Image: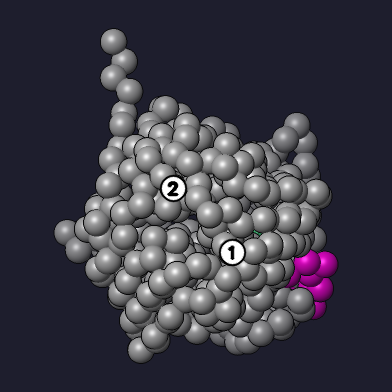
Amino acid sequence: MTMESFIITGKQRLEGTIRVSGAKNSSLPLMAATLLAEGTSVLWETPDLADILHMRQVLENLGCVIHLGQDRQMSIDAASLRDFEVDERLMRTMRASNLILGPLLARCGRVRIAMPGGCAIGSRPMDQHLKGLKELGVRIRETHGYIEAAAERLRGADIYLDVPSVGATENIMMAAVLAEGTTRIHNAAREPEIVDLQNFLNKMGAKVRGAGLDVVKIEGTKRLTPAEHTVIPDRIEAGTHLVAAVMTQGDIQLENVIPEHLEPVIAKLRQAGALIEVEDDRMRVRHEGPVQPVDIKTMPYPGFPTDMQPQFMAMLACAGGTSIITETIFENRFQHVDELRRMGANIRAEGRTAVIRGTDKLEGSFVETTDLRAGAALFLAALAAEDVTVLEKVTHIDRGYENLLEKYQALGAKVKRMTPHHP
Ligand code: EPZ
């Protein structure tokens, strides 16, 4: 990982328009789902991100032929898969590579992947993925950090998830579409990305119903055919920009958003004093004066999203009072606390709870990105801080935010990227 940094001069009021990119967390399962059909599918609006490039490498490693058109439409030809195994290095770099499990089992009946490693925010187990696949008739062997899975024929089942896991719901959906009989996933994740996957699978000829609710029903079919699909906008990118407007007392117009995907975020921002106008696929957010403290408890969708927790902590660090944040989804998602404290934030974290006492200003500092959304939080804090902040290891941010610097320079931010020149 190169030591690229952002140099950010704070206190610039952001004003103008940002077009939100396609959702990373929808593009990744949709790319995996193209493995289910022997032919060429096309995905529109997949964002130009490191994680998307990574999933492309995983699919090409399996034998897919992928092209990116001049309008960034991504064509994926999955007609002839040469392998059911993915190179370990590729697997370990990105956890979401595990989304090939379901489609490969449905398509080839076999798959061998390295257990994806944990990451900064938690151990990220896969027990719910494996539990669901076993109930569809998959035999699974876990040896020396590898998962070997095989099934002559997948058969539908009633599956009860212990936790509403996004990835497990997606993997089971993608396995069940070619199983014999009906599958119901109970306690399914309800995120908009699950609905987007259902819509794409049904365009391929699948029969999936109920995504977005807590029971997803899949009637197995014999074959699927390639399809075209436009990825939904990235609700977490959009939420991050809303917080940026509040933190810089700015006035930002967002284009290409689905407001109902952001309801808990909009509600909390309004509680903090933001002025938010919603109209079709656009939103306008303005803020003047102090940020009001608010309490946040992350929950599975449609609750407050864990992926917006670090960004809100940065905002509440500058609020006019004390806020409490409870992180119920991941066991270690407070990596940004120490770095925010280096900037003068008054935060105390105990277990899954953090108490944030708002200060009237943050100081520019040298800070380090530990994971994607922690990086986003520090980026936002730097925009609001006095003086200059050097934010290091920004390749984490490049995983989830397309053209971030360009988008913010257009709003008046003074930000630039610094790549160390090796002598
Ligand atoms: C997806 O990860 C997102 N990633 C994450 O976004 C997001 O934070 C997360 O959902 C929760 O919303 C993608 O969609 C690519 P989970 P995923 O399985 O599917 C536990 C970002 O910043 N769990 O819903 O891996 C797990 O430990 C990323 O874009 C099990 O116990 O999340 C966690 O505590 C970060 N067993 C909770 O469930 C399992 O088998 C939620 O995990 C699976 C998960």
At mark 1, the secondary structure is loop
Instruction: Give the magenta-colored segment's residue range.
Output: 156-164
Q: Tell me the amino acid under the disc marked 1.
A: Gly
Q: Is residue 377 magenta?
A: no
The answer to whether residue 387 is left or right of residue 378 is left
Q: Is residue 157 magenta?
A: yes
Q: In the rendering, which numbered label is found on residue 320?
A: 1
Task: Give the quarter of the image for residue 298.
Answer: bottom right
217 is higher (above) or lower (below) than 295: below
Q: Residue at x 57, y 62 (%)?
A: 319
At mark 2, the secondary structure is loop
Q: Residue at x 33, y 43 (%)?
A: 9
Which of the two residues, 347 or 120, is positioned nearer the viewer here? 347
The 10 Å Cα crowd at callout 2, few under 14, some 14 to 19, many 20 or more, is: many
Q: Tell me the amino acid under the disc marked 2.
A: Ala
Which of the two residues, 234 or 394, is positioned nearer the viewer here? 394
Which of the two residues, 188 or 121, is positioned nearer the viewer here? 121
The 10 Å Cα crowd at callout 1, few under 14, some 14 to 19, many 20 or more, is: some
Q: Position of residue 87 (x, y in %)?
A: 53, 36
Q: On the image, numbered disc 2 is attached to which residue?
A: 385
